[in-house]
Amino acid sequence: MEDIKLEKTNSTPMINTDFQAGTVEIRGKSYPENTFEFYQPLLDWVEGFSKTAGQNLTFTFEIQYFNSSSSKVFYDLFDVLEEAREKGKTIIVNWEYDPENVSAEEAGEDFQEDFEKLEFKLVTKEG
């Protein structure tokens, strides 16, 4: 499975997947011009990963800002992760946020409430 390595821009986050390590990182701001097109490769990657035998996944989000269409994609992504969890995979979601960014913290809390089957951790960034 081919990993994804995207650099962040003003309107899109950095995305790094590592199949061997079982990790995904998304960091930055998310308001791409075509959100669904931008995130489709990641959704495909996660769906492919979820079909592999025995491997677990740690997902780290550090999103300072995201628009409503990004929120919809994140819900779709968390749905796929919950399905993988129900198939026996260990899925850990680390939602990192700056303690001064109340909206990012609240978004993480909302996702945590909506996706109770995931091991969803709210992580305050230090410094």
Image (cartoon, rainbow, N blue to C red):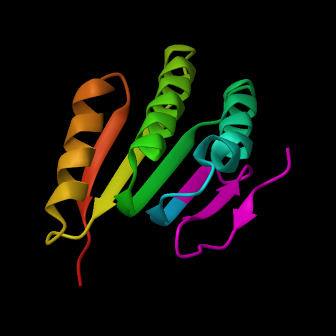
Task: Please identify the quarter of the rendering in which residue 32 is found.
Answer: bottom right
The N terminus: image quadrant:
top right
The C terminus: image quadrant:
bottom left
Q: Give the magenta range.
A: 1-25
- Left/right placement of residue 3 relative to residue 35 reads right
25 and 37: which one is in front?
A: 37
Name the residue located 47 percent from the left edge and 23 percent from the top edge: 82
| Residue 67 position in % (x across, y down) | 40, 51
Q: Is residue 41 above or below residue 16?
A: above
12 and 124: which one is in front?
A: 12
Q: Is residue 42 above or below residue 60?
A: above
75 and 70: which one is in front?
A: 70
| Residue 85 position in % (x across, y down) | 50, 22
- Left/right placement of residue 82 relative to residue 45 reads left
Task: Please identify the quarter of the rendering in which residue 41 is found.
Answer: top right
Name the residue located 57 percent from the left edge and 23 percent from the top edge: 84
Q: Residue furthest front?
A: 33
Name the residue located 28 percent from the left edge and 26 percent from the top edge: 114
Q: Is residue 74 above or below residue 105?
A: above
